[in-house]
């Protein structure tokens, strides 16, 4: 019996749905996982809405409007919105908040809201709050003249404890015992990226974050950041994308850093030059380091930094090896843009076999496919997008159409 991807995805997202009123604001969204992630996470909700548009466009819009309902008047939207109840004292130490009274964390996630709106609702230019959100990002996080965004903590990338950040923050990196000291330091500096850099502390112009930024800027009909991404983050000699870092604890040349999946993330950019995209596919994606096992390993198989361990020192350290569905979807978008539909379908088939056996888990062991992390994990329903692909929305278009029933 084949695995019913649409049915299973619908059941999960509806089971994770939460509605209510909090501090005079109405909320409606799917938690990423009922037991592990009880609040609203920014980019998780964007992925949920993209999937939900296939069967309930009204709820997809509600989820994204809930993010906008949390937005500060100046346009800031935090990484996590704490709908329903505040943080307890224990969690407050590890969350990026100025005080326990805050509705949101004081840090960002990859800014894919405008792009998700284009997928799930329609033209984001019709929603002025999204333009306000982008104005905040440009003012506070575009630290150089090229308009690319910079991060002040590893978790802002969405790839919390990726080994690519080890040389940047050292003992203060996420997942290490001293990570709360990084939060405390940034709290003293007002979570202000310019103040952090001026004080001599690390900031990162990170690949995946800027891919999300480029997709959203294009959805708003603004000039594409893709040329700036190529200029600052692409090495034409190595054929790889890598973060730009200022004030790293242990400065490390890109060639000596771990090979992480996000070097492939620019494949999702609709205006990435074909020559660059094809080289990424030929030299990175098709190599045994990424092609073997379950797509798509967070760290290349065989890389010294790759690990399947879920915890160190009793703490979760995500994105150090296992495979995630959302990263596979980003890559599949690029494969289909290049006309490599069979290759994208094979990637989807391999993931479907794993999810059918293990369920919608947060991530999967990259060699065996064993389910790991949170259960009933919302963005893993992006598998539906992989098995029944729709063309990404063009700038200024209506919402991306649902292709119709999947073969499952």
Image: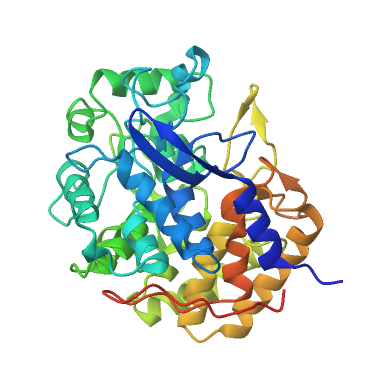
Task: Give the answer, above or below, for where 25 lies relative to 98.
Answer: below
Residue 35 in the image: above or below residue 118? above
Residue 82 in sight here: yes
Q: Residue furthest left?
A: 145
**From this viewpoint, which residue is outermost toward the right?**
1
Residue shown at 45% from the left, 18% from the top? 92
Q: Quadrant of the N terminus?
A: bottom right
Position in image of residue 83 (x %, y %)? 44, 32
Which of the 4 quarters of the picture holds residue 290? bottom right
Q: Residue furthest top?
A: 89
Q: Nearer the viewer, residue 1 or 126?
A: 126
Determine the image quadrant of residue 78: top left
In this rendering, position of residue 393 left or right of residue 125? right
| Residue 142 in the figure: left or right of residue 359 | left
Up the image or down, 286 lies above or below 116; here it is below
Q: Residue furthest bottom?
A: 339
Question: Image check: 68 left or right of 377?
Answer: left
Image coords of residue 167 (percent x, y): 43, 36
- Front position in the image: 237 or 271: 271
Q: Quadrant of residue 148?
A: bottom left
| Quarter the C terminus occupies | bottom right
What's the image's color scheme? rainbow
- How far from the left and from the top, in percent, is residue 383? 62, 64
Residue at left offset 28%, top offset 40% = 71
């Amino acid at each position: 019996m084949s695995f019913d991807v649409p049915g299973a995805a619908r059941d999960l997202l509806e089971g994770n749905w939460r509605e209510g009123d909090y501090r005079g604001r109405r909320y409606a969204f799917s938690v990423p996982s009922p037991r592990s992630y009880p609040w609203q996470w920014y980019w998780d909700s964007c992925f949920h809405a993209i999937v939900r548009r296939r069967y309930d466009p009204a709820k997809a819009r509600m989820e994204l409007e809930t993010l906008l309902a949390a937005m500060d008047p100046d346009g800031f939207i935090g990484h996590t919105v704490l709908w329903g109840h505040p943080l307890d004292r224990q969690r407050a130490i590890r969350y990026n908040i100025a005080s326990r009274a805050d509705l949101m964390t004081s840090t960002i996630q990859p800014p894919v809201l405008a792009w998700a709106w284009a997928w799930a609702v329609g033209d984001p230019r019709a929603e002025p709050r999204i333009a306000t959100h982008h104005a905040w990002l440009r003012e506070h996080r575009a630290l150089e003249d090229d308009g690319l965004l910079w991060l002040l903590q590893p978790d802002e990338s969405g790839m919390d404890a990726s080994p690519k950040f080890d040389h940047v923050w050292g003992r203060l990196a996420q997942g290490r015992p001293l990570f709360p000291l990084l939060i405390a330091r940034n709290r003293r500096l007002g979570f202000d990226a310019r103040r952090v850099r001026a004080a001599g502390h690390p900031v990162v112009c990170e690949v995946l974050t800027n891919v999300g930024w480029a997709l959203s800027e294009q959805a708003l009909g603004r000039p594409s950041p893709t040329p700036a991404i190529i200029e600052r983050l692409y090495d034409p000699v190595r054929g790889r994308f890598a973060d730009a870092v200022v004030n790293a604890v242990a400065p490390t040349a890109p060639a000596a850093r771990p090979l992480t999946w996000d070097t492939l993330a620019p494949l999702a950019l609709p205006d990435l030059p074909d020559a660059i995209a094809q080289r990424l596919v030929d030299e990175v994606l098709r190599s045994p380091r990424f092609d073997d096992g379950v797509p798509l390993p967070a760290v290349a198989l065989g890389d010294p930094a790759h690990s399947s361990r879920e915890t160190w020192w009793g703490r979760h350290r995500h994105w150090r090896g296992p495979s995630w569905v959302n990263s596979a979807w980003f890559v599949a978008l690029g494969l289909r843009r290049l006309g490599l539909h069979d290759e994208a379908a094979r990637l989807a088939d391999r993931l479907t076999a794993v999810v059918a056996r293990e369920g919608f888990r947060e991530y999967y062991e990259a060699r065996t496919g064993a389910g790991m992390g949170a259960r009933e994990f919302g963005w893993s329903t992006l598998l539906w997008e992989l098995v029944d692909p729709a063309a990404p929305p063009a700038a200024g278009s209506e919402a991306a159409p649902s292709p119709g029933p999947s073969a499952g």
